């Protein structure tokens, strides 16, 4: 019986080594990440079998009888030829690893999590007896995580390497431009897309009032990345996968949201939701309550840009375990700051966008909840400013209907005015800070329409298709 996906991945790797012993040379570090004793025993048995094969040409490294005997000799007494053949090797044959780098990477993440949890328990005990405080524990835990994960050489820039590194970076950016892989804000919002340049390793914050289009903007960014051939890992906390998909189809096809809720479907919708031929895709996960470190690990496994919608509805992982201990003083700001640092680290090390969506705090003018941490940690901060319609008003939709007739809208008192703006509050890597981009929030189709020239007149529907 296969207990879980970790066991499957371990059997895949150890079994792959038995079926093709070159795996031992290509991925020697994999044995470090194996948790199940039978997987480690098989790996070590394959190493011995390979050594024997070098002395006796023709001897195979996937012989169940030989492997079982070597596993027993190595201390795994439960090994039998049947066990090796019908369990370990069968998994490797039935589910071969299409991408060994990804599979070993997943096992490495599981290893880091296990080792981190062990160390966390040790730190908890030291806090309880008063040997260290929370701040020291957080520093020690962060240092230990880095030691467990190992420091990648390409993260380190020595002074003598600067010239070569600069040249390499310039070459990479030129290639990205040629491949059109640099991330862009939605191109339908032409001025916003042109004037707010987004770097690959950026932590983006989107805030606004309830119903003000925060998720709509994040969804449009995700779709822009997908169409350009990029993988996106979209973490939902308020919406379900079904809701996110219905909203996307509303934007794409103009179909009524209510019709989709009642089961209306067309073949073209399936095509829209499939991965793109260029590799672009959006993977949705209902992530409310899932620890941040697990979400980031899953993003790494998929090599994906990340959208987290909303931030305050996820769990901040193992760091929160400190706060659950009696006698430990830990406020929400500490957790938010530590979590944002992890999210920013993901963006910088993985060279991917991380887009965080968050509500305003009690003071709307100040920005998002715990605004100081959010505003200072983000590289790009986009704030949606929407006014409330106090007295009610009539207005025209920016687009005409299918016959060319103007669409007149009544905005009831207390509702948000669709005429709004997206403000670039902070732009670390560019010069857009302070710029305001007028928009129309089309709630029926879950989209923003750019009013780039303050043109509130009626345009043809075809102008936006």
Image (cartoon, rainbow, N blue to C red):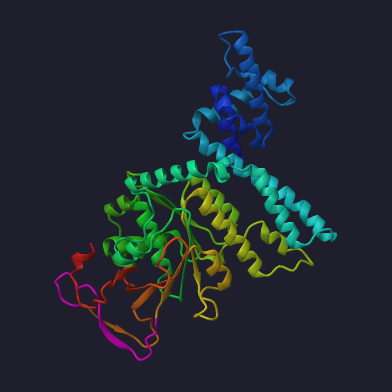
Q: Please, is residue 427 above or below residue 47 in the view? A: below
Q: Is residue 260 rendered to the left or right of residue 214?
A: left
Look at the image and say whether residue 193 sits in the magenta stretch: no
Look at the image and say whether residue 397 sits in the magenta stretch: yes
Q: Please, is residue 447 above or below residue 412 in the view? A: above
Q: For residue 225, which quarter of the picture?
A: bottom left
Q: Which residues are magenta?
A: 387-406
Residue depicted at x 75% and y 59%: 136
Residue 24 in percent (x, y) is at: 59, 25
Residue depicted at x 62% and y 21%: 46
In the orientation shown, which residue stands out farthest toward the bottom? 391
Residue depicted at x 35% and y 64%: 195
Residue 379 in percent (x, y) is at: 49, 62
Q: Is residue 4 shown to the viewer in this render?
A: no
Residue 231 in percent (x, y) is at: 42, 49
Residue 64 in percent (x, y) is at: 61, 19
Residue depicted at x 61% and y 65%: 336
* Dominant secondary structure, magenta: loop
In the orientation shown, which residue stands out farthest toward the left? 403
Q: Please, is residue 204 above or below residue 56 in the view? A: below
Q: Is residue 292 rendered to the left or right of residue 224?
A: right
Q: Is residue 460 shown to the viewer in this render?
A: yes
* Quadrant for the N terminus in the image: top right
* Quadrant for the C terminus in the image: bottom left
How many numbered markers are drawn? 0
């Amino acid at each position: 019986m296969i207990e879980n996906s970790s066991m499957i991945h371990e059997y895949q790797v150890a079994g792959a080594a038995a079926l093709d012993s070159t795996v031992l040379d290509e991925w020697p570090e994999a044995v470090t990440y194996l948790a199940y004793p039978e997987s480690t025993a098989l790996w070590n048995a394959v190493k011995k079998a390979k050594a024997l094969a070098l002395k006796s040409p023709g001897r195979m490294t996937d012989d169940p009888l030989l492997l079982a005997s070597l596993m027993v000799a190595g201390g795994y007494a439960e090994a039998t030829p049947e066990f090796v053949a019908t369990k370990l090797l069968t998994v490797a044959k039935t589910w071969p690893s299409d991408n060994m780098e990804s599979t070993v990477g997943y096992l490495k993440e599981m290893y880091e999590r296990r080792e981190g949890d062990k160390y966390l328990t040790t730190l908890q005990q030291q806090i309880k007896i008063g040997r260290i405080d929370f701040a020291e524990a957080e520093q020690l835990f962060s240092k230990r995580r880095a030691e467990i994960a190992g420091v990648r050489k390409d993260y380190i820039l020595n002074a003598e390497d600067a010239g070569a590194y600069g040249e390499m970076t310039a070459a990479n950016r030129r290639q990205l431009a040629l491949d059109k892989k640099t991330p862009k804000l939605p191109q339908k919002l032409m001025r916003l897309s042109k004037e707010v340049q987004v770097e690959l390793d950026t932590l983006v914050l989107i805030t606004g009032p309830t119903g003000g289009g925060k998720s709509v903007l994040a969804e449009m960014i995700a779709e822009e990345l997908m169409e350009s051939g990029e993988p996106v890992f979209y973490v939902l906390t308020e919406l379900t996968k079904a809701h996110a998909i219905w909203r996307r189809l509303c934007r794409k096809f103009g179909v009524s949201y209510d019709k989709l809720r009642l089961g209306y479907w067309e073949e073209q919708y399936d095509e829209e939701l499939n991965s793109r031929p260029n590799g672009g895709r959006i993977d949705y996960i209902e992530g409310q309550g899932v620890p941040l470190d697990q979400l980031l690990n899953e993003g790494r496994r998929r090599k994906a840009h990340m959208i987290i919608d909303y931030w305050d509805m996820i769990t901040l992982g193992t760091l929160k375990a400190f706060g659950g201990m009696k006698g430990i003083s830990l406020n929400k700001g500490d957790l938010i700051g530590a979590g944002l640092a992890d999210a920013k680290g993901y963006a910088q090390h993985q060279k991917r966008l991380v887009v965080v969506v968050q509500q305003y705090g009690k003071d709307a003018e100040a920005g998002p909840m715990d605004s100081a941490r959010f505003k200072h940690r983000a590289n790009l901060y986009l704030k949606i400013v929407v006014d409330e319609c106090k007295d009610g008003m009539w207005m025209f939709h920016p687009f005409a209907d299918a016959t060319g007739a103007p669409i007149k809208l009544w905005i009831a008192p207390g509702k948000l005015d669709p005429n709004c703006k997206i403000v670039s509050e902070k732009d670390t890597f560019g010069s857009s800070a302070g710029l305001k981009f007028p928009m129309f929030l089309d709630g029926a189709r879950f989209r923003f329409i750019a009013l780039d020239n303050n043109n509130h007149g009626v345009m043809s529907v075809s102008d936006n298709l």
